Amino acid sequence: MSIRPEEISTLIKQQIEQYQSVAQVAEVGTVIYIGDGVARAHGLMNVMAGELLEFENGTVGYALNLEEDNVGIVILGSFKEIKEGQQVKRTGRIMQVPVGEALLGRVVNPLGLPLDGQGPIHTTETRDVESRAPGVIDRKSVHEPMQTGIKAIDALMTNFHLPRSTLFMLVSALMGLEIMQSVYKHAIEEGYRFYSYGDASLLLPNR
């Protein structure tokens, strides 16, 4: 079978016309410290606070401290295979997690990836991890207690030793003065014991 030159020329032209050159540019840094779930990398000059970074082994990190000559990274996964001198690259994505009703009853890791073996989470909604919380005025007041059934948890309350203490006033501003006064009065009348642990009190009946 003979091959005609014009056929070869036509094939080459078709290949040239269909050729697409896609250049991928990535900013890459070098790990200069690793330990206790934290890494430091040099060379990521344009990294954003809260940006996700990817190490050579596929582990993802979270840019936390942006210093003049290095970046502090919180490692979201195993760091045993990450070594000094390895590369870490930017993803250009701020740390987000999936949200929505599809997450109800699911077990996920810090990145929102499923760990329960029930397949992917079908949701298109995400939210930045570092999101501004709504102001106190915009929040709905606490109107329904959440009972867990575990006595040690249900008895925990924000610390308020005296009705005129600063902490009591602060909690009253959030919960309502009448509610907190009635709680305090009930605790005294029923003989509750006050166990103080820093910023929380454990209130248990004296019987």
Image (tube, rainbow, N blue to C red):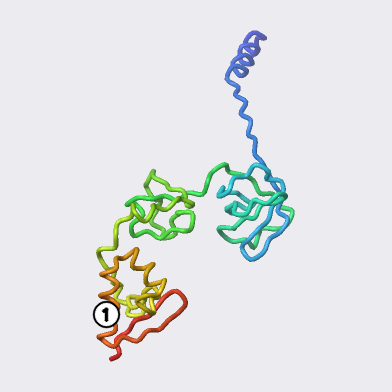
The reply, left or right, for residue 33 in relation to residue 136 is: right
Name above or below for residue 89 compared with residue 64.
Answer: above
List x then y, in percent, for residue 195: 40, 84
List x then y, in percent, for residue 107: 40, 60
Q: Identify which residue, 28 or 121, lies in the foreground.
A: 28
Q: Number of numbered discs present?
A: 1
Q: Identify which residue, 181 or 110, lies in the foreground.
A: 181
Query: Dot 1 lies on which element?
Result: helix
Give the residue at the far front of this rendering: 164
Number of other residues with Cα within 10 Å of mark 1, as a class: few under 14, some 14 to 19, many 20 or more = few
Query: What residue is rendered at 29% in x and 88% in y?
Result: 191
List x then y, in percent, for residue 43: 71, 46
The three-letter amino acid code for the residue at tag 1 is Lys
Find residue 204 and report its image quarter.
bottom left
Task: Read off the residue under disc 1.
Answer: 185
Query: What residue is rendered at 28% in x and 74% in y?
Result: 181
